[in-house]
Structures are given as C-alpha cells and as structure tokens.
Amino acid sequence: MKSRNQLNERLRKPCILETDPMQLLILIKRRQPKSSMIKQIISGDRGSPRQKKSLDKFKTINREAQRILQQQKLDLAKQRKESFQEIIKMNEQSLDQVPNSIANSGIKDKLIKVRKNIMSRIITNEIHEKTLSEWKLPELKRMATRNLEKDQEIRIN
C-alpha cells in the first residue's frame, strides 16, 4: 500500500493533458488498445466490409430515429396549436365583450399576447415531457428499424 506522501506527490504532478496533448496521443498509440473499434478510431480506418456495413446500418437507424422524433414533435406541436387557437379565439371574443371603460384596447391586446405566450410555453413543456418520458431513444430506434425493414420489403416486392 502506498503511503499518504506518495499519493500526495502523485496528485501534485500535472496531468498529461496539462503538459502536452500530443503526449496523450502517443500514449494511446503505444498501449495498443484491445478494442478493435478504438484501433479504427485511432488509425482512421473503418474496418472490414462487415464492420462498415454494421456502422452504416447503425448510422442509418440513428438518423431515422432522429427523423421520427422530429416528426412526432412537429405533429404534437401542430395538434396543440390548433386546439389552443380555438381557446385564444374564445378569449378574444370574451375580451371584446368587456367595455372599453373597464379595459382599453391596449390592455386587451396585452392580455391576448400573454395568453398566446402561455400557450406556447405549455406546448414546449408538453413536448419536453414527452421527449423525456415516452420518446426514448431505444424505442425510437426500434421504430426506425421497423420502418427501414418495411421500406426494404417494399423495395424487394
């Protein structure tokens, strides 16, 4: 077991990154990483044809999952905006019934503006909640894989 002084001396020594970033690259290359993926990253090689195909499929699935997520976000936002537009129209109608002696047109316009702002924040919050709870990446990847398989079946037929 190392003594406390030895540990303290080791902690006082600067990190490789603090001294020279090139030393870190040299150290990584010298250690001969065991993982073939790390070797490929260091050498810039994408590997065998099988690995290339696997990497391309992985990238395609990720792109499709991101596209599905964006589409779901847009669909939810569009649906909520349509329903909130009806609410805003009802608010405008009820504000029009208020006499100008109680609230002038500037105040009414500001109230409508505040209501629209609140509605847009509610939409943003709903999208964020769905992204965290329902639209998880593994599920999106499964959906993307299913979509890609269906597309391939259609192309084959």
Image (cartoon, grey):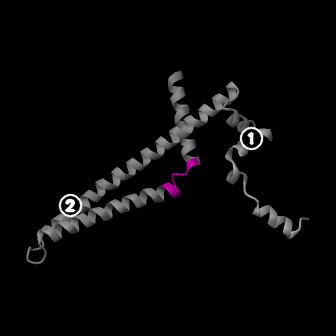
* Residue furthest front in the image: 19
Looking at the image, can residue 94 be seen? Answer: no
Task: Identify residue for label 2.
Answer: 89
**Of 139 and 108, the residue lying toward us:** 108
| Magenta stretch holds residue 86 | no
Task: Give the extent of the magenta segment.
Answer: 131-137
Vertical order, 121 against 77 (above or below):
below
- Write the residue at 72% across / 46% down: 24
What is the x, y in percent for residue 139? 56, 47
What is the x, y in percent for residue 111? 22, 69
Q: Is residue 115 left or right of residue 12?
A: left
The Cα atoms of the two marked residues, 2 and 1, are separated by: 66 Å
**Of 86 and 108, the residue lying toward us:** 108
Q: Which mark is residue 26?
A: 1
Q: Quadrant of residue 106?
A: bottom left
* Residue furthest bottom in the image: 102
Looking at the image, can residue 51 be seen? Answer: yes
**Of 46 and 24, the residue lying toward us:** 24
What is the x, y in percent for residue 25? 71, 42
